[in-house]
Amino acid sequence: ANGYYNFMWTKCLFSSHDLSDMVMIDNYIFNKDVVVQFNSTVGHYVGYTELGVKSAQAWNNNPSQLQAERADVERFCKHNAEIRQSAIADKT
């Protein structure tokens, strides 16, 4: 295929059972290069290309978008980690 490759990859990282150290990283990728990244520890978007820097500036100036992204740690990462941990605990 001679098209473009554009996707977002979300990673939820943690190393303890209480999930207090949970970190969410959203990578916005174009043609295998990370263009923009949101890291919940940093708390804002960081651009890695010319387009990414412009996008990060625009997204960081939108308080509702930043608030939604920060809330995804609880809504998406911790929620799913709790479900997986309880499923594993039920089988042991």
Image (cartoon, rainbow, N blue to C red):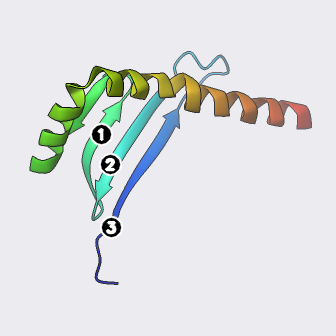
Question: Residue 25 location, x and y as percent?
Answer: 41, 36
Task: Please state which amino acid type lies under the numbered disc 3.
Answer: Tyr
Task: Please state which amino acid type lies under the numbered disc 2.
Answer: Tyr
Q: CA distance from mark 3 to mark 1?
A: 17 Å
- Where 50 sits versus 20, above or below? below
**Image mark for residue 82:** none
- Where 4 sits versus 72, above or below? below
Residue picked out by circle 1? 37
Graded by Cα atoms within 10 Å as few (under 14), some (14 to 19) or many (20 or more), the crowding at tag 2 reads some
**Element type at mark 2:** strand
**Image mark for residue 28:** 2
Question: Residue 91 location, x and y as percent?
Answer: 90, 38
Q: CA distance from mark 2 to mark 3?
A: 11 Å
The quarter holding residue 63 reads top left
The mark nearer the N terminus, 1 or 2, is: 2
The mark nearer the N terminus, 3 or 1, is: 3
The quarter holding residue 18 reads top right
Q: Are marks 1 and 2 in contact (CB under 8 Å)?
A: yes
Residue at image location 38% in from the left, 21% down from the top? 67
**Element type at mark 1:** strand
Q: CA distance from mark 1 to mark 2?
A: 6 Å
Q: Are marks 3 and 1 in contact (CB under 8 Å)?
A: no
Graded by Cα atoms within 10 Å as few (under 14), some (14 to 19) or many (20 or more), the crowding at tag 3 reads few
Residue at image location 34% in from the left, 28% down from the top? 65
Residue picked out by circle 3? 5
Graded by Cα atoms within 10 Å as few (under 14), some (14 to 19) or many (20 or more), the crowding at tag 1 reads many
Q: Is residue 43 left or right of residue 24?
A: left
- Extreme-right residue of the structure: 91
